[in-house]
Image: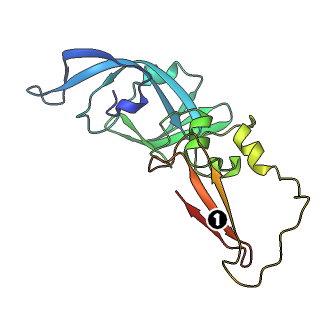
Amino acid sequence: MFNIRSIFTKLTPTPGEKIPASSSSSSLLSEGRNTVEIMINNNEFVLENCQYIPRLFKNLICLLDLCNNPITISKKINRFTLSKGNENIMHGEIINKLMMAMLNQPSSYLILKHSNWNEGIGHPSNSILKSQGLLHNNDPCTVCVKAKSTMLPFKEHFEEVHHPLDCLHPDLVGPINPSSASGHKYFLTIMDQFTHSNSLVC
């Protein structure tokens, strides 16, 4: 059971379906069910037939559903560890027969394609994506490759200048995809030939 709509790959509405709560007189309203894709410490899990309950206080994952994935669960006194191969992917405490996971990055359960992260936060390097716990891979990105390329030198030299603002070099870039956070698809760079300072205008 999950309270976050965005982690459902698709959602089948379940109008009026109620889930019994801890109190016999109360229940929670399920607004739909379907497949969830979550990311836990850079490991992907696909869970089927999950319920979307917006008023749920904490997300609950059925142990049987988790066991459908290739993982190993080990228990020691009141603590547990989930492993995938030789890598520990989750650990936590067992409280009232519930396994309470301790996650390093609570926002990494959202699964997006590597290209979504790469484009959305300005084409950072894989090392930066990895340090933030985001998806990363070694597939070449066309924009990243072009950004690292250098322009051939101009055949002619610019005239010498002696003061700031004597000569400015503007460059209009766009349309860009995705657009900026404020919705712009073009931006203008202006370089002062004397000071070599750059300005950016959206």
Residue extending furthest right? Answer: 155
Above or below for 63 versus 130: above
Would residue 182 be found to the left or right of residue 168 on screen? left
Position of residue 46 measured from the top left corner of the image (x, y, whole percent): 51, 23
Q: Residue at x 73, y 37 (%)?
A: 142
Position of residue 122 measured from the top left corner of the image (x, y, whole percent): 60, 49
Closer to the camera in the image, 34 or 201: 201
Closer to the camera in the image, 170 or 9: 170
Q: Mark 1 points at which residue?
A: 190
Closer to the camera in the image, 177 or 158: 158
Mark 1 element type: strand
As shown in the figure, which amino acid type bears the numbered disc 1?
Ile
Q: Which residue is drawn at 53% across and 40% down?
A: 90
Q: Quadrant of the N terminus?
A: top left
| Residue 119 visible here | yes
Q: Which residue is drawn at 58% across and 63% down?
A: 200
Position of residue 19 measured from the top left corner of the image (x, y, whole percent): 21, 21
Q: Residue at x 78, y 80 (%)?
A: 161
Above or below for 9 versus 147: above
